[in-house]
Amino acid sequence: MKIFEIDDKADEIAEHFIVTHDCPLEYTGAIGGKISYEFVVTSIGVGITVKCGCGESEDLTDYASW
């Protein structure tokens, strides 16, 4: 099993995106799903994106750590 972690800086960026994003969606289903995190594993590092159900997203990747 692989566990992905988000550092404090990425967490702050994600929280800011979630709080300030003006999403037009009012309902995203019974189990939610409005906000999701995407982790893309590459040979040089892990790309991280926080996404809203409306399609807007914010890159959380720390490219300096690659």
Image: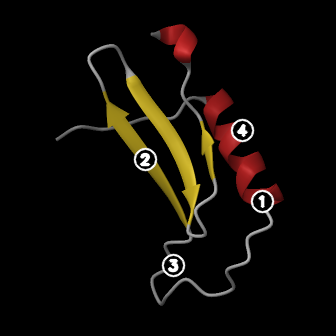
Percent of width and height locating residue 13 = 71, 38
Residue neighbourhood size for the residue with mark 2, other residues' Cα within 10 Å, grouped as few (<14), some (14–19), many (≥20): some
The answer to which of marks 2 and 4 sits earlier in the sequence is 4
At label 3, the amino acid type is Gly
Q: For mark 1, does the 10 Å Cα neighbourhood hold few (<14), some (14 to 19), or many (20 or more) residues?
A: few
Corner quadrant of residue 58: top right
3 or 1: tag closer to the N-terminus: 1
Q: Which residue is mark 1?
A: 21
Give the alpha-carbon distance from disc 3 to disc 1, as whole Å.
Answer: 17 Å
- Against 34, is 52 above or below? above
Q: What's the amino acid at mark 4?
A: Glu
**Residue at x 30%, y 38% (from the top left corner):** 3
Query: Nearer the observer, disc 2 or disc 4?
Result: 2
Q: Describe residue 31's horizontal placement relative to residue 61 as left or right.
A: left
Q: Which residue is mark 3?
A: 32
Q: CA distance from mark 3 to mark 2?
A: 16 Å
Circle 3 sits in a helix, a strand or a loop, which is it? loop
| Kind of residue indicated by mark 2 | Glu
Disc number for residue 38: 2
Q: Quadrant of residue 63?
A: top right
